[in-house]
Image (spheres, rainbow, N blue to C red):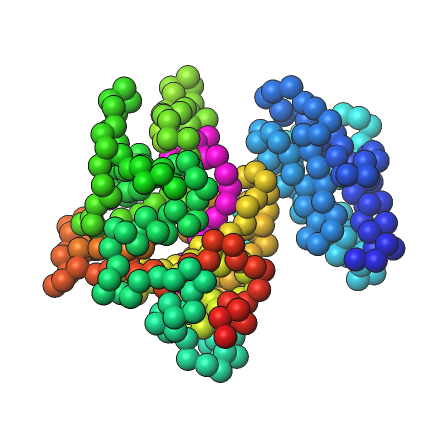
Amino acid sequence: MSAENLAIRQRIAAALLNGALGDDGFTVCPGAHLHQGKSALRDFRVILTGAPTAFCFHSSCSTVVDEFNLELRRRIAAAERGDDLRPRTPSMMGDGVPPAPMPPRRLKRPPFEPLKLAQFAGQCRREITLDWLSARSPVPVPTAAAQGPETARLFLDALYDTDERVLVFTRFYSQGDFMVTAGSGGCVRLADKQGVESVTSPLPHGGPEGVWFLNQPITGDWKINNATTQGGDARWGRRHGDCVTAWRYLVLESDVADPDLWLRALVQLPLPIAAIYTSGGISIHALIRLDAEDKPTFDAIRDELVQVVCPLGADAAAMTAVRLTRLPGMLRHGKTNKEGTLQRYDRPRLQRLAWLNPEPELEALVEIAK
């Protein structure tokens, strides 16, 4: 970015905030009046390079911060195009009186465009298959016939730091059925209730509808879920945002795209793809390494990515910061129908691992795996 463009962005941000930005982008949060805890100077930061985005340590001001980001980006885009800069949303400039909280604005998720997927996938002139990926995986992966619980351990140990804890699920709506400690070989079966000790256990070989893992590492402890607790009625869990220790991975999956086209699209996206694996059905999942500083940062990156990958068939609902996704190496025995009845397959289906790279680069996989 040129120095001139950066100076324009700094002036726009300062005008919106009614105050100067520090050299490092820290300033007073426009939603400081909504903070439930004590505010500090380094709670709120504005990043003006790349996609301009502001983040705040507090979550109670998220509505105001979201509105600030929308107006900041609109004004910057307009200024860099030379357009009219009249605001479309209420100005955050004023006489020092904090702005009233504004209603949340839902992120517009672009619809799937099959033609766009076909055109983009068609730019990849080579055949891309799971076998092709496996043969070029930076971390060697077993053949499909040789995959099992050891593959799941290989996967988790490669993607999570030593002693980080990862929840594993054989029941989608549980609070975690197993917990793996990466790098140590440790695995325990978890109780459904607080106060009941876990017991040492190997990973299962599969589950009725397969096996999942939580994409972010967690503390492993029961914690109050502050996002859902209301009126003093504490709700406890092991799989929510307050349990997360690092905002590392984002999941890309599609249930609407043709699997062959989706795979050819995935390998062309300039994203840090850490893993590609199947659902045990027709869906192919990709794990994107973000290493976001916090959840607001994760959400901001996700919101930008949604605009690119959803027209290609990505499921925006699966791109949440805390998400269950398929654990490779495990068997899936069936699928629940609309009536809630498990329909067993003729034979178990493998959630197959095809690509594993714990240190991916921001580069199209097809260029790396030549």
Does 323 sit above or below residue 335? above
Q: Nearer the viewer, residue 64 or 50?
A: 50
Q: Nearer the viewer, residue 37 or 76?
A: 37
What x and y, as percent, mark residue 350?
24, 60
- Residue at the far front in the pictured view: 184
- Residue at 21% x, 55% y is 332
Name the image quarter holding the N terminus: bottom right
Give the left or right position of residue 360, taking residue 66 as reference: left
- Residue 327 seen in this snapshot: no
Q: Quadrant of residue 344?
A: bottom left
Does 20 sit above or below residue 152? above
Give the left or right position of residue 249, taking residue 24 as reference: left
Q: Which residues are magenta?
A: 239-256
- Residue at 41% x, 24% y is 224
What x and y, as percent, mark residue 196?
24, 22
Report if residue 318 lies within the magenta region. no
Report if residue 245 lies within the magenta region. yes
